[in-house]
Image (tube, grey):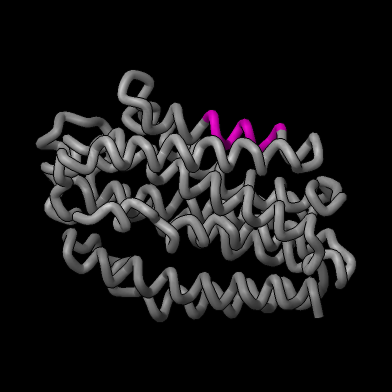
Amino acid sequence: MSLLAYFRLYESLQAAVPALAGFLKSSPPLIPFSVAAAVFLSAVVSQQLFLYTYNDFCDFERDRLNPRKEPSASRLKKPVTALAAFLFIASSFLISLLPIRSAALAWGVQALGIAYSHPRLSLRTRVPMAQFIHFAVGAGYFLIGRMAAGGSWERGGLAAAAYFGLLYMSGGLNNEILDLESDRVAGLDSLALVLGPSRALRLVVLAQVLAILALAEAWGDRRGPLMALAGTIAYTLSLRRWIFTAAPSAPQEGFRARYRMLFSVLSAALIASWVA
């Protein structure tokens, strides 16, 4: 595995989606293209780059037992440590430039992310802390963006935060299902291990259906219920194979690919409705 593999740009850009959504929901049309917006997005992406790199650093030994991930080379541990330290400094500097409320919430997200991965704290193995943290991060990034652009915590904004939080939480639990056997071999606890794959998958589906229903309030007008209904129908039809039967680990990758595609479309439509 090369050092570039630890530079998790794709996953970090995913975190920019709820942050950008919160920013756009609160901003006049010209603000998103300002220097302040560039600093804000750079802070979010660099923070996520740090948290993913730190997570990989803490997972060197665990990943050796996970066939879903390429085994790590121990010779890269020092370079990855240096990369994590650099990203921590860069993200900390950029976060300090944000408005005080956004910065405080971003520091909270960072503290949760570190506690999630730290080998002694390891909150991800304390059921159900991993689900709480994933929800808090997804919802938190939306609210960070909202406050960075001067928005308030009104009902529609909180519904949108819940939408992104539920998506993050369900994605994290689905990954636990994918990692079920390696976590069992490593002696790690997870909600998927406690519930079993069938019940864990039902919880993933429930969280994602609730996320779609949150769209009705997040949309902010009469189109919301129609989009939520259309999303629920599309979700049921495209994912019926997994919704009604608990699939084994390999087909679970197909489940993840399909729901990511569906929620990418729904999220893009939601953001477009705010800036149109």
When asked about the image quadrant of residue 52, the answer is top left
Q: Is residue 3 above or below residue 133?
A: below
**Residue occupying the point 36% across, 54% down:** 202
Comparing 260 with 20, the one in front is: 20
**Image quarter hosting the N terminus:** bottom left
**Residue occupying the point 33% across, 51% down:** 6
Total residue callouts: 0
Comparing 185 with 63, the one in front is: 63
Q: Is residue 57 left or right of residue 92?
A: left
Q: Is residue 134 left or right of residue 196?
A: right
Q: Is residue 244 visible?
A: yes
Q: Is residue 108 above or below residue 79?
A: above
**Residue occupying the point 63% across, 48% down:** 43
Comparing 123 with 38, the one in front is: 38
Comparing 165 with 53, the one in front is: 53
Q: Is residue 182 visible?
A: no
Q: Is residue 239 left or right of residue 169?
A: left
Inspect the magenta stretch and tell me whether residue 105 lies in it: yes
Q: Is residue 118 above or below residue 190?
A: above
The picture places residue 131, in percent across and down from the top left corner, at: 44, 40
Q: Is residue 249 left or right of residue 54?
A: left
**Image quarter hosting the C terminus:** bottom right
The picture places residue 137, in percent across and down from the top left corner, at: 56, 43
Q: Residue furthest top?
A: 120
Q: Is residue 229 above or below residue 46?
A: below
When asked about the image quadrant of residue 250, the answer is bottom left
The picture places residue 252, in percent across and down from the top left corner, at: 25, 64
Inspect the magenta stretch and tell me whether residue 199 lies in it: no
> Start and end of the magenta stretch?
104-111
The picture places residue 108, in percent across and down from the top left corner, at: 61, 31
Magenta-drawn stretch, dominant element (helix, strand or loop):
helix
When asked about the image quadrant of residue 63, the answer is top left
